[in-house]
């Protein structure tokens, strides 16, 4: 196509066709030092206003009088160094003074080459933190990546080519940004508002100067690039900056003397290379969304996010005011209608036009359904705790859903077709087979001072009548001072201590040890073991999935703890409510032993180890939101404070 004057991007953008556009007038300022090649190209550019072509039907503006290139470009402004780091919100970066576009007007009335260099100049300036009469770039989420991307391509535009042809990928990228809520993402994070404003300005390019139009093109290109790089990362890895999270976790551990472990592999990808491969790709949006992993839990949670986002856009749900506890049959003209509307919006109640003032049976059952979703006792009473849960803003619920979507996206691999999953905030264990829960039970997990680590392993065997090897932390913090006062403490509680791990090692007599030379900081040269039987905290069975955290699942002699809704009482291991049920299922499906044989081993009171024919994946996870089979969303409390740490790291 013959090169032509840059009339307006409006025609191209409105019909979505790639046209070649030319410039007709140019008044730019380049406060960034140009290369020798740039200056040479400027001096060689011939000024020849192109003839208008009638086929566009757009009137041609008159070109301004010619002028010569200034002999001196002038002293360039030195921009302040902006904040470095990938996936960082730039909104807090130090702002530089605004640059007057015509203060150093060194070229006018250039042809296409002049516009190429002008936009290149704007790209350099904007990415260096400059702004032009208050117009700049802010809020970049992948700032370091975006700068590196343009530096590698010598500051050439990506979305609009050097001959000013519109890349059709612009429209696909805009559609992807608008569709972000369907993926559990926020459109605003990817500059939807800024891009819409810029595109509107370009569409009205007949009423703005060529200088402003070129600035708009540079802004458009940068925002689209940052949007792609950020969304690609968010879809593939999740929104959480996991590298920064691990740094903060170490700081928190050092400050609190509590051992935290989020021991899951990290995902990374070369997003610049990915973007380069997208040039002219007609399936950009499909390939972009294809970066996300997919499983039933993730897909249902994305649907829930979209629904909750619709509630947000409609103004959210009503707030329930304080008052006396409401029960089945209670009457309250003010709060009952608000409760009905609140439960309808969240999908717990199916009566849209409820107008009564009495707690009816259907409304009572709806409230119980809500309480179960929150992991509360389903009393059906509108008490203060329930009221507080009802009044959590939909915006906060959206953040929690988005956070857990990110955790699922960060998974390196699928959980598998058969696996055991322990969800710490839910205090539950489920054995999943083909997306169905075949076994489920309550569990007790690590208390806040002894948090259960987040990791995956494979169950390889179980022990009947297990020994309990006491963790060093328990020995030092809970046993040492008692042994110092009474060395007979060990024998009276059926503990034995050894110097080595060898089989048939001889126990050490505690009366032969000078216990007072040890304290909490000492490295004790012994390990302590409790024999099988009565008083053993592991009960009659423990399920072993070897790992570096020395964590396993086991029976317990403290069954009363399972009655509590919050069950964080252990030193890190996982206590099972119904270990016999799991033992029977694993014995029948993963061993050559019969249930009768296992029962005889139990009755022997001696320790026995049974290996599995096939190992079972075990996933210890931390999910505070998930979608249920009926479409409702369950939420749980952030017992270890990981939500509080990770939400600010999502870059929203």
Image: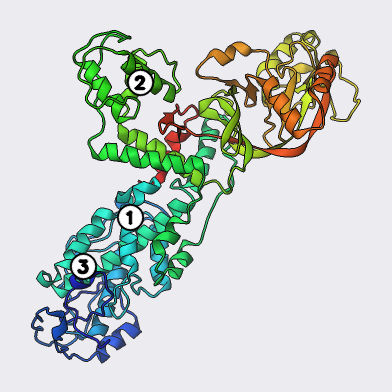
At a point 79% along the width and 19% down the height, the residue shown is 465
Position in image of residue 555 (x %, y %): 69, 19
Q: Does the residue at mark 3 contact the one at mark 1 (Cβ under 8 Å)?
A: no
85 with respect to 470 (left or right)? left
Does the image show residue 513?
no
Position in image of residue 107 (x %, y %): 18, 82
Disc sitting over residue 14 in the figure: 3
In terms of sequence position, does the residue under pointer 3 or pointer 1 come before the other?
3
Tell me if residue 336 comes above or below residue 430 in the rendering: above
* Residue ID for mark 2: 366
* Residue ID for mark 1: 177
Q: How far is mark 2 from mark 1, CA to CA? A: 36 Å
Q: Which colour scheme is used?
A: rainbow
At a point 81% along the width and 30% down the height, the residue shown is 610
Tell me the mark number nearer the camera, choosing from 3 and 1.
3
In terms of sequence position, does the residue under pointer 2 or pointer 1 come before the other?
1
Tell me the mark number nearer the camera, choosing from 3 and 2.
2
Front residue (pair 294, 129): 294
Q: How many labels does the image show?
A: 3
The secondary structure type at the circle numbered 3 is helix
In terms of sequence position, does the residue under pointer 3 or pointer 2 come before the other?
3
User: Which quadrant: the N terminus?
Assistant: bottom left
Q: How far is mark 3 from mark 1, CA to CA? A: 18 Å
């Amino acid at each position: 196509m013959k090169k032509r004057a840059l009339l307006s991007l409006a025609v191209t953008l409105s019909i979505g066709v790639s046209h070649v556009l030319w410039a007709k007038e140019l008044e730019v300022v380049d406060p960034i030092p140009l290369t020798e090649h740039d200056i040479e190209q400027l001096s060689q550019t011939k000024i020849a206003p192109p003839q208008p072509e009638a086929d566009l039907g757009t009137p041609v503006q008159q070109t301004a009088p010619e002028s010569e290139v200034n002999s001196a470009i002038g002293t360039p402004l030195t921009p302040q160094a902006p904040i470095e780091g990938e996936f960082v919100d730039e909104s807090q970066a130090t702002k530089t003074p605004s640059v007057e576009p015509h203060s150093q007007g060194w070229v006018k009335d250039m042809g296409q080459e002049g516009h190429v260099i002008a936009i290149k100049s704007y790209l350099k300036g904007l990415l260096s933190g400059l702004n032009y009469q208050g117009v700049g770039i802010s809020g970049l989420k992948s700032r370091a990546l975006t700068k590196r991307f343009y530096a590698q391509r010598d500051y050439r535009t990506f979305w609009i080519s050097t001959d000013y042809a519109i890349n059709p990928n612009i429209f696909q990228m805009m559609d992807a940004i608008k569709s972000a809520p369907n993926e559990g993402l926020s459109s605003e994070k990817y500059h939807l508002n800024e891009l819409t404003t810029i595109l509107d300005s370009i569409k009205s390019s007949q009423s703005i100067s060529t200088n402003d139009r070129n600035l708009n093109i540079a802004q458009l290109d940068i925002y689209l690039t940052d949007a792609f790089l950020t969304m690609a990362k968010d879809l593939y890895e999740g929104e959480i900056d996991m590298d920064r999270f691990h740094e903060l976790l170490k700081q928190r551990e050092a400050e609190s003397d509590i051992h935290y472990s989020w021991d899951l592999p990290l995902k990374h990808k070369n997003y610049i290379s990915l973007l380069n491969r997208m040039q002219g790709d007609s399936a950009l949006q499909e390939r972009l969304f294809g970066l996300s992993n997919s499983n039933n839990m993730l897909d249902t949670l994305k649907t829930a996010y979209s629904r909750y986002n619709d509630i947000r856009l409609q103004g959210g749900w009503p707030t329930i005011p304080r008052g006396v506890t409401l029960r089945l049959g209670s009457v309250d003209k003010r709060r009952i209608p608000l409760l009905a509307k609140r439960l309808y919006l969240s999908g717990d109640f199916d009566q849209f036009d409820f107008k009564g003032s009495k707690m009816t049976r259907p409304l009572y059952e709806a409230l119980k359904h809500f309480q179960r979703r929150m992991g509360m006792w389903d009393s059906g009473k509108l008490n203060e705790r329930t009221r507080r849960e009802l009044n959590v803003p939909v915006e906060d619920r959206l953040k929690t859903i988005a956070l857990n979507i990110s955790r699922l996206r960060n998974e390196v691999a699928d959980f598998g077709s058969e696996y055991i999953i322990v969800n710490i905030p839910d205090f539950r264990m489920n054995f999943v087979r083909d997306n169905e829960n075949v076994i489920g039970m309550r569990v007790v997990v690590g208390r806040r001072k002894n948090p259960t680590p987040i990791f995956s392993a494979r169950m390889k065997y179980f022990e009947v009548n297990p020994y309990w090897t006491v963790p060093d932390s328990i020995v030092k913090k809970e046993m040492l001072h008692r042994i110092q006062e009474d060395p007979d403490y060990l024998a009276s509680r059926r503990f034995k201590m050894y110097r080595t791990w060898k089989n048939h090692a001889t126990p050490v007599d505690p009366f032969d040890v000078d216990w007072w030379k040890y304290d909490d900081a000492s490295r004790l040269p012994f390990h302590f073991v409790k024999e099988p039987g009565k008083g053993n905290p592991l009960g009659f069975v423990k399920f072993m999935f070897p790992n570096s955290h020395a964590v396993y699942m086991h029976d317990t002699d403290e069954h009363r703890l399972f009655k509590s809704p919050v069950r964080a009482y252990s030193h890190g291991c996982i206590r099972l409510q119904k270990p016999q049920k799991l033992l029977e299922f694993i014995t029948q499906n993963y061993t050559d032993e019969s249930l009768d044989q296992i029962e005889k081993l139990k009755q022997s009171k001696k320790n026995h180890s049974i290996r599995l024919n096939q190992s079972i994946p075990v996933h210890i996870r931390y999910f505070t939101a998930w979608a249920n089979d009926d479409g409702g969303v369950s939420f749980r409390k952030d017992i270890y404070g990981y939500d509080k740490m990770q939400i600010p790291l999502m870059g929203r």
